[in-house]
Image (tube, rainbow, N blue to C red):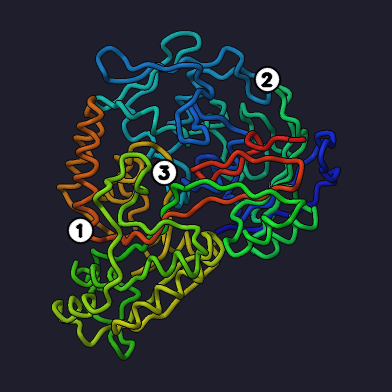
């Protein structure tokens, strides 16, 4: 799953009863894409940026919506918006108070960030206007009822108005524009390597025990584990499942885990007649894309042994998936099970669709972003080859894969999506809806999927005030989309962290690694 953050902070080694260190070093598995909080809807970026910037509301380790910049919030009497009441002591690190104008300018910036691989407009597509409704109250007016707006906006981090209007992504990366209201302020950002933070003197809450935090990017799993065992870092994320038993036996280490909301899935090009990674059996480009046929897509799904991946590659630390929310979390449909492993039925479907002789498929994905991502890529390629598909695997660094993916360079790609909200509006809108940038739809719909029925179900669900009705609609829409199979769910990851003795980590379903979740223990 992620990468390698480096610059060794000098830390006092922790032992039982030791005094809290002033500095802590945390090893990440993947780097933030930038320090611009509006550049990319990207969990590794949000996770680190959240230490410096704040949203109006946030989520706790169990995905419950909790106050952040807003102390409280309520829907307007007519149902066409929400009032968020800002904390009276909220200050940016330059000492200026947080105001409604800052929120308005932040939201206005989202569609205008150049070269964004995934715009944050997916979180604000219901907002039509922002107003000041009092000295410390910001009013978000919506396109029709928006009962889920507070669930949508935790990734939206607020910056000062002047920063929102003038700053570039380069200004954020250089630190000039990295002015937020969070617990920490940015000292140094070296893209792909490290982030160094210091406690913010304007933070209104209790002071963290750690005055200085260094995030090191250590993409290699073995190197990340070795750094922890050597005491070079005090917390690591994305613990490789194969190393969990060994770490649990180490008296200087503690392991922490939580069921995760991160879905690993396969995106298939369902819209283009000529697709860049599809060839005939001799490797020649074709004018007919077999992935446009739902029978072929269903065959590819039935050919995947998800339980085998869970057992042999993920060491038991994954949950096979048949939909985009994990069963037991949120509003997932308990009847929508993972496809069974059935290669005979898969071969029959290929023959029925006219592809008994197979074809050649380039299958791409990252090799440094998700848990065991390259091994999962290779395993799935092997399953597909058993039903007659010739597969060429392209496992790439995430900083290469994701920009190419955003340009729809692939016909079949292994990727992931994470939404920790209880309801799946932030799954449907970016991944399953017809691409419409003006509405914030389809921002990561690399597969070109478009089903007006699914779009219509989403439009009804997001305005329904009755939660039971929304749940019914979400499940109906998910069943239709999974039957169409533009994406093939593989599994949900289990989130695993490990700390040095003397530290405890409160594991999170959203897989975020936060200093606020790290505590010193006897």
In primary-sequence order, the first of circles 1 and 2 is 2
The residue beneath circle 2 is 95
The correct choice, above or below, for 302 with respect to 51 in the image is: below
* 227 relative to 312 in the view: left or right: right
Whether residue 194 appears in this view of the structure is: no
Q: Position of residue 246 (x, y in %)?
A: 67, 61
In primary-sequence order, the first of circles 3 and 2 is 2
Direction bottom: furthest residue = 282
What SS does tag 2 mark?
loop
Q: Quadrant of the C terminus?
A: top right
Q: Tell me what residue is drawn at x 48 percent, y 25 percent.
A: 103
Q: Tell me what residue is drawn at x 43 percent, y 41 percent.
A: 420
**What whole-number distance in Å separates the C-alpha atoms at marks 1 and 3?**
21 Å
Image depth: mark 1 or mark 2 in front: 1
Q: Position of residue 312 (x, y in %)?
A: 48, 70
What SS does tag 3 mark?
loop
The residue beneath circle 1 is 483
Q: Position of residue 47 (x, y in %)?
A: 57, 42
Q: Position of residue 25 (x, y in %)?
A: 75, 46
**What whole-number distance in Å separates the C-alpha atoms at marks 3 and 2?**
33 Å
Asked if the residue under mark 2 is in contact with the one under mark 1, i.e. CB atoms within 8 Å, the reply is no
The correct choice, above or below, for 123 with respect to 430 in the image is: above
Image depth: mark 3 or mark 2 in front: 3
Q: Tell me what residue is drawn at x 23 percent, y 75 percent.
A: 346
The residue beneath circle 3 is 419
The correct choice, above or below, for 442 with respect to 124 in the image is: below
- Density class for disc 3 (Cα within 10 Å; few <14, some 14-19, many ≥20) is many
């Amino acid at each position: 799953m992620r990468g390698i953050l480096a610059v060794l902070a000098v830390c006092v080694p922790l032992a039982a009863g030791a005094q809290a260190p002033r500095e802590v070093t945390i090893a990440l598995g993947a780097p933030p894409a930038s320090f611009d909080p509006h550049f990319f809807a990207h969990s590794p970026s949000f996770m680190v940026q959240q230490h410096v910037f704040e949203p109006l509301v946030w989520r706790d380790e169990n995905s419950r919506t909790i106050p952040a910049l807003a102390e409280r919030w309520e829907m307007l009497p007519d149902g066409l918006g929400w009032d968020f009441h800002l904390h009276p002591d909220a200050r940016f690190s330059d000492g200026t108070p947080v105001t409604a104008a800052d929120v308005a300018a932040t939201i206005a910036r989202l569609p205008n960030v150049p070269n964004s691989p995934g715009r944050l407009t997916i979180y604000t597509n219901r907002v039509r206007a922002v107003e000041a409704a009092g000295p410390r109250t910001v009013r978000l007016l919506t396109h029709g009822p928006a009962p889920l707006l507070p669930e949508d906006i935790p990734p939206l981090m607020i910056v000062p108005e002047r920063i929102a209007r003038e700053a570039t992504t380069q200004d954020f990366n250089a630190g000039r524009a990295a002015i937020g209201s969070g617990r920490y302020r940015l000292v140094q950002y070296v893209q792909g390597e490290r982030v160094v933070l210091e406690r913010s003197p304007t933070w209104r809450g209790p002071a963290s025990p750690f005055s200085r935090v260094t995030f090191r990017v250590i993409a290699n799993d073995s190197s990340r584990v070795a750094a922890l065992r050597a005491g070079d870092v005090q917390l690591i994320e994305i613990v490789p499942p194969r190393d969990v038993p060994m770490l649990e036996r180490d008296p200087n280490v503690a392991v922490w885990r939580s069921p995760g909301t991160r879905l690993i899935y396969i995106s298939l090009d369902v819209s283009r007649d000529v697709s860049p990674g599809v060839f005939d059996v001799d490797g020649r480009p074709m004018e007919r894309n077999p992935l446009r046929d739902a029978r072929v897509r269903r065959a590819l799904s039935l050919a995947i042994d998800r339980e085998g991946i869970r057992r042999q590659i993920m060491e038991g630390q994954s949950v096979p998936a048949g939909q985009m929310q994990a069963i037991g979390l949120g509003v997932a449909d308990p009847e929508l099970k993972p496809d069974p492993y059935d290669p005979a039925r898969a071969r029959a479907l290929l023959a029925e669709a006219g592809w008994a002789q197979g074809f050649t498929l380039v299958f791409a994905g990252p090799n440094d972003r998700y848990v065991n991502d390259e091994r999962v890529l290779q395993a799935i390629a092997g399953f597909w080859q058993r039903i007659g598909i010739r597969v060429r695997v392209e496992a790439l660094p995430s900083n290469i894969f994701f920009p190419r993916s955003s340009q729809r360079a692939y016909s079949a790609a292994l990727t992931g999506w994470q939404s920790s909200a209880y309801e799946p509006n932030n799954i449907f809108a970016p991944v399953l809806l017809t691409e419409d940038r003006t509405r914030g739809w389809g921002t990561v719909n690399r597969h070109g999927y478009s089903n007006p029925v699914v779009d219509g179900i989403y439009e009804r669900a997001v305005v329904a005030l009755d939660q039971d009705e929304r749940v019914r609609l979400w499940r109906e829409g998910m069943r239709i989309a999974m039957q169409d199979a533009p994406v093939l769910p593989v599994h949900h990851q289990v989130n695993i962290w490990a700390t040095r003795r003397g530290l405890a980590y409160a594991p999170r379903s959203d897989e975020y690694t936060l200093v606020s979740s790290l505590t010193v223990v006897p």
